[in-house]
């Protein structure tokens, strides 16, 4: 079979890979996007029932929102269902430390938005469907990779072969591209399992994202939008020790709702309904390099971090944006899209930021998991001190929104 030729082949149409494909859309480059799962351009039917919400949501920064706007995906998803959060409250479940942020402190209408992953995925795919230079291979897996004279050769499970100058691994945390190319990977277990679900609460969330740091791990309530008066829904991310997670997953819904309400100190009153729960083991991963000749990694394929600050896909979007910018610039200048200077500029622009975020998440996790008195004192007085400093808070808010301080 004669192989099809592409400039860029992206493996993985998760949020990072699809966003990269949209960003390369409309250029002179021939792009392929390969995804193992079936892809749908149809919006799912939405209702205000807890089971109608995707349990996987992302807290998107303003920076991610602005980029998605440029890609033509933001307005599509916003017309379906997104929820702004205007306030954020974080407190120490073991002490008195408390900090809150308000969008008004930085003169913004919102600190960010909670978006269901599957809706964002449809929005990106709809934007992509308008781009004629991107060919989508859905329900297709890559069986084998090979280096050849053009760069890379990709063997698909339907016997087709693609050759490409640049292969992008956007194939998630267990990236086969990364493993095949033997990228060095640092990884460690966070010792946490995250349980996610959609829940209804007695009291309104007031567009506030809330997170309690328990000794076992953080528990977040992220506000969701509903149109039913008197109905208040939140998406929860409950990160905890494996033994507690296992016990929580085994509870029936009524027991789970009671236990969740207690763990959250009943800040939104009783929990009145819950969707099915899903659990995810949390591991930190970081590839020592993001590039090799003719290969680049983006998103979770390059790094995974604790969801406690909701930064995972925001970092993935920044990777995709940076790689798209370098690749498009190379194409305009008549350079190869896999030129060493192109790939190394991409890596330089992203690695330091991603590593810094990984270190901050590790620090948070250790600080709040600590039982030693000096550390407990530090987090209580530290949080209160930062809460009183308008300048420091503005810097923190801007960073959390993905903007320059
Ligand atoms: C509990 C939890 C809560 C989170 N909350 C947030 C949050 O609030 N904000 C935030 O920014 N991030 C959050 N994250 C992180 C975020 O979900 C991930 O960073 C993001 O989904 C990763 O996207 P990705 O496109 O890189 O990878 P993935 O979503 O894993 O996509 C990879 C894709 O590649 C496909 N694939 C894999 N192998 C092959 C193959 N061989 N051939 C073809 N296709 C293949 C897969 O089917 C998949 O579709 C959270 C994570 C967890 C676990």
Image: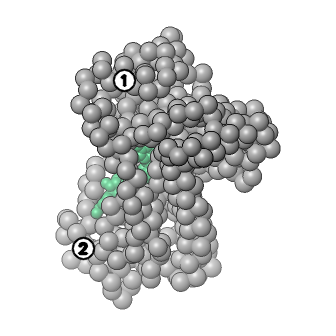
User: Residue 390: x percent and y percent?
Assistant: 79, 39
Q: Could you say which is closer to the camera, residue 135 or residue 201?
A: 201
Q: Quadrant of the N terminus?
A: bottom left
SS of the residue under disc 1: helix
Q: Could you say which is closer to the camera, residue 63 or residue 273?
A: 273
| Mark 2 lies on residue | 144
User: Residue 227: x percent and y percent?
Assistant: 50, 17
Q: Is residue 200 above or below residue 38?
A: above
Residue farthest to the bottom, as pictured:
149
Which residue is at a point 25% across and 78% down the rendered structure image? Answer: 2
Foreground tag (1 vs 2): 1
Q: Is residue 116 left or right of residue 60?
A: left
Estimate the spatial distance between the alpha carbons at disc 1 and disc 2, rounded to whole Å: 47 Å
User: Residue 360: x percent and y percent?
Assistant: 57, 55
Q: Is residue 223 left or right of residue 390?
A: left
Query: What is the quadrant of residue 10 in the picture?
Result: bottom left
Which residue is at a point 72% across and 54% down the rendered structure image? Answer: 404
Q: Could you say which is closer to the camera, residue 321 or residue 271?
A: 271
Query: What is the quadrant of residue 209 in the picture?
Result: top right
- Label 1 neighbour load within 10 Å: few <14, some 14-19, many 20+: some
Residue farthest to the front, as pictured:
373
Q: Tell me whether the residue at label 1 lies in contact with that at label 2, contact meaning CB atoms closer than 8 angstroms.
A: no
| Mark 1 lies on residue | 259
Q: Is residue 188 visible?
A: yes
């Amino acid at each position: 079979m004669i192989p099809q030729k592409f400039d860029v082949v992206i493996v993985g149409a998760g949020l990072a890979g699809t966003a990269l494909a949209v960003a390369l859309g409309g250029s002179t480059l021939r792009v392929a996007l390969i995804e193992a799962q079936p892809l749908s351009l149809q919006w799912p039917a939405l209702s205000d029932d807890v089971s109608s919400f995707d349990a996987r949501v992302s807290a998107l920064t303003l920076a991610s929102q602005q980029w998605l706007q440029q890609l033509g995906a933001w307005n599509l998803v916003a017309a379906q269902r997104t929820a702004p959060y205007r306030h954020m409250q974080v407190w120490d479940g073991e002490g008195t430390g408390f900090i809150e942020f308000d969008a008004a402190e930085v003169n913004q209408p919102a600190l960010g938005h909670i978006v269901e992953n599957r809706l964002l995925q449809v929005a990106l795919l709809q934007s992509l469907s308008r781009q004629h230079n991107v060919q989508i291979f859905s329900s297709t897996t890559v069986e084998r990779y090979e280096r050849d004279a053009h760069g890379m050769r990709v063997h698909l499970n339907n016997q087709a072969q693609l050759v490409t100058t640049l292969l992008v691994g956007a194939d998630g945390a267990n990236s086969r591209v990364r493993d095949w190319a033997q990228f060095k990977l640092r990884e460690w277990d966070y010792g946490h399992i995250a349980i996610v679900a959609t829940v209804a609460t007695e009291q309104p969330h007031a567009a506030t994202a809330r997170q309690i740091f328990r000794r076992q791990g953080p528990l977040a309530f992220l506000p969701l939008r509903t149109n039913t008066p008197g109905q208040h829904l939140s998406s929860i991310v409950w990160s905890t020790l494996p033994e507690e997670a296992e016990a929580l997953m085994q509870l029936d819904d009524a027991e789970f709702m009671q236990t969740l309400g207690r763990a959250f100190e009943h800040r939104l009153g009783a929990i009145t309904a819950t969707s099915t729960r899903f659990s995810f083991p949390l591991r930190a991963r970081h590839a020592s390099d993001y590039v090799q000749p003719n290969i680049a990694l983006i998103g979770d394929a390059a790094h995974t971090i604790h969801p406690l600050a909701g930064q995972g896909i925001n970092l993935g979007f920044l990777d995709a944006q940076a790689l798209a910018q370098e690749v498009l610039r190379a194409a305009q200048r008549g350079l190869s899209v896999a030129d060493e200077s192109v790939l190394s500029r991409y890596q330089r622009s992203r690695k330091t930021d991603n590593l810094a975020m990984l270190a901050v998440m590790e620090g948070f996790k250790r600080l709040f998991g600590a039982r030693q008195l000096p550390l407990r004192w530090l987090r209580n007085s530290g949080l209160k001190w930062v809460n009183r400093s308008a300048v420091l808070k503005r810097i923190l808010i801007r960073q959390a929104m993905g903007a320059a301080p």
